[in-house]
Amino acid sequence: TIESPQLRTFLNLQTLLEKTENIDEKVVLGRNFNSIFNSKLEGKGRKPKLKKSIAKLIEIKENLNLCDIWRVRN
């Protein structure tokens, strides 16, 4: 499935981001991951299909205290 390579990418991303935790710099990540987190706000009511990928992104965001600026501003 498409989700397997996406999960590998997110695991690699997580590893890279974890390496930046102890440096005194800000990390900005620009990317459209094409994942629907809230079907009422995005995706025109479609249900999320890549549930493992979405769970991994949420885990990364929460564990590394990241924010989704689009969600903050909209």
Image (cartoon, rainbow, N blue to C red):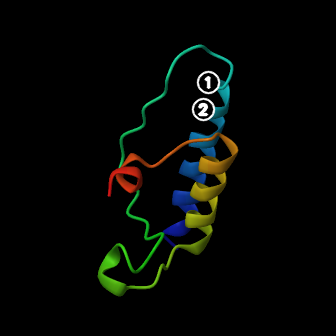
Local SS, label 2: helix
Instruction: Please count the marks in the image.
Output: 2
Q: How far from the left and from the top, in percent, is residue 27?
A: 48, 28
Disc marking residue 44: none
Which residue shows up at 48% across the image and 79% down it?
Answer: 48
**Residue 34 location, quadrant:** bottom left
Q: How far from the left and from the top, in percent, is residue 4?
A: 58, 64
Which residue shows up at 62% across the image and 15% down it?
Answer: 23
User: The C terminus is located in which quarter?
Assistant: bottom left
Amino acid carrying mark 2 in the image = Leu
- Residue in front for this viewpoint, 22 or 50: 22
Q: In this picture, is 39 found above or below 70?
A: below
- Residue in front for this viewpoint, 39 or 50: 39
Q: How far from the left and from the top, in percent, is residue 8?
A: 59, 52
Residue at mark 1 to residue at mark 2: CA–CA distance: 7 Å
Amino acid carrying mark 1 in the image = Thr
Dot 1 crowding, Cα within 10 Å, few <14, some 14–19, many 20+:
few
Circles 1 and 2 in contact, beta carbons < 8 Å = yes
Which residue shows up at 49% across the image and 79% down it?
Answer: 49
Q: Relative to 32, is 3 on the left or the right?
A: right
**Residue 63 location, quadrant:** top right
Dot 2 crowding, Cα within 10 Å, few <14, some 14–19, many 20+:
few
User: Mark 2 — residue?
Assistant: 16
Local SS, label 1: loop
User: Mark 1 — residue?
Assistant: 20
Which residue shows up at 58% across the image and 74% down it?
Answer: 51
Q: In this picture, is 46 found above or below 4?
A: below
Marks 1, 2: nearer the viewer: 1
Q: In this picture, is 34 found above or below 21?
A: below
Q: How far from the left and from the top, in percent, is residue 7?
A: 59, 58
